[in-house]
Amino acid sequence: MDIQYLLFLQDFRNNINDALTPFMEWVSMFATTYLILLPVFYYWNRDKKSGLYTLVSYYFCMVMTPLIKLTACVYRPWIRDSRVLPAGDSITTATGYSFPSGHTTTAAPLAGGTAVNAWKNPSTRWLSVILVLFILTTGFSRNYLGVHTPQDVLTALLISALSLILTAKLFAYLDEHPEKEDTLLLGGFIFCWAAIVYITFKPYPMDLTAEGNLIMDPQKMMNDGYGDLGKMIGFIIARYIEKTWIQFRPLKNSRESVVICLLGLIPMILLKSYLSPFMTSWLGSHWGKLFFSVIYTCYYIALFPFVLTWIEKRAANQTVSQSKTA
């Protein structure tokens, strides 16, 4: 049934001469490349705790997704059925195994957590509606492009929903027991490294093509897993640094602070465009992806917040100096 659905969408694509394919590819690309900028900006400029809620939900998904993917080892639809022909360039960007959809477990917590935050303010509830529609469009795009089955997407949505709920309960617990955070961070750090050991040494399917080549190279399949787990490792390191030594407060939502935070997003785009390929060429795909994720996450969780704290202190000192002069 799942393959028949993909073939139905494939026929529809062909009948309209792939008119919607560029849009669907853009949705998938935006979800994994630029969507994270929204909760990061919220974390820096609006509400630190609400921004962290969205980001931690995302990190939970980034831990669960590779563990499930690399345990289930479900082949992509076109491998299971040669009639499935992915649209456009999606076959080159659809890396790893199929189940669950990584694009969906990226979009759903990032957009979903931001939607939860936006819904709290009646004036921004329109944004929540747009974000939920974006989640659904992202999931559908993976089916439309022929790179995921409906089961892949639905499971990814379920994982994301559980992650949002789990994070809300975790934050409520830490509100009552803030002294437990360091213990939880340490436990998460150990778990992530144990997960890396697991995905590195577990057995993988070694099925061969008719020509005698591996259908899926396990080494290549681990790449995204290392990168995803690196995001949680980076968060744990950065969160400990930030809460222990930086303790930043979001800048007041003035025009100046908005501009400062928007400028702070530019290095994130540059890091992803230039540092990521450099790290993988230098350290290899596994460790390059992992350490890039650590650096990337540390930038927006701790390094730029340190800059914001410095700006706030400098402005406060100038205000004191001016008042003394007056």
Image (spheres, rainbow, N blue to C red):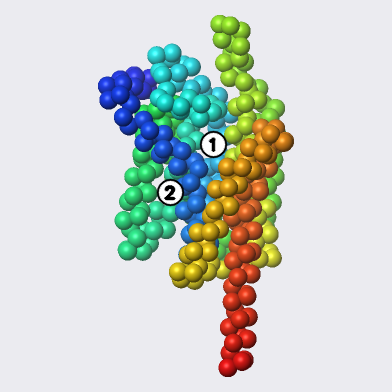
Q: Residue at x 58, y 29 (%)?
A: 70
Place of residue 72 in the rendered image (x, y in percent of width and height, measured from the top left)? 54, 26
Q: Residue at x 51, y 23 (%)?
A: 74
Name the quadrant containing residue 114. bottom left
Residue at the spot of label 1: 65
Place of residue 41 in the rendered image (x, y in percent of width and height, measured from the top left)? 50, 58
Task: Tell which circle, 2 or 1, labels the residue nearer the N-terminal end.
Answer: 1
Judging depth in this view, the residue of 145 and 133 nearest the camera is: 145
Position above or below: 230 against 73: below
Q: Residue at x 59, y 34 (%)?
A: 224
Residue at the spot of label 2: 111
Name the quadrant containing residue 108. top left
What secondary structure is found at the residue carrying circle 1? helix
For the question of whether residue 107 can be seen, the reply is: yes
Q: Residue at x 40, y 18 (%)?
A: 84
Place of residue 55 in the rendered image (x, y in percent of width and height, measured from the top left)? 53, 52
The quarter in which the C terminus is drawn is bottom right
* Three-letter amino acid code of the residue under disc 2: Ala
Q: Residue furthest top?
A: 210
For the question of whether residue 162 can be seen, the reply is: no
Q: Are marks 2 and 1 in contact (CB under 8 Å)?
A: no
Closest to the camera, between mark 2 and mark 1, is 2
Position above or below: 5 against 293: above
The quarter in which the N terminus is drawn is top left
Position above or below: 101 against 86: below
* Three-letter amino acid code of the residue under disc 1: Thr
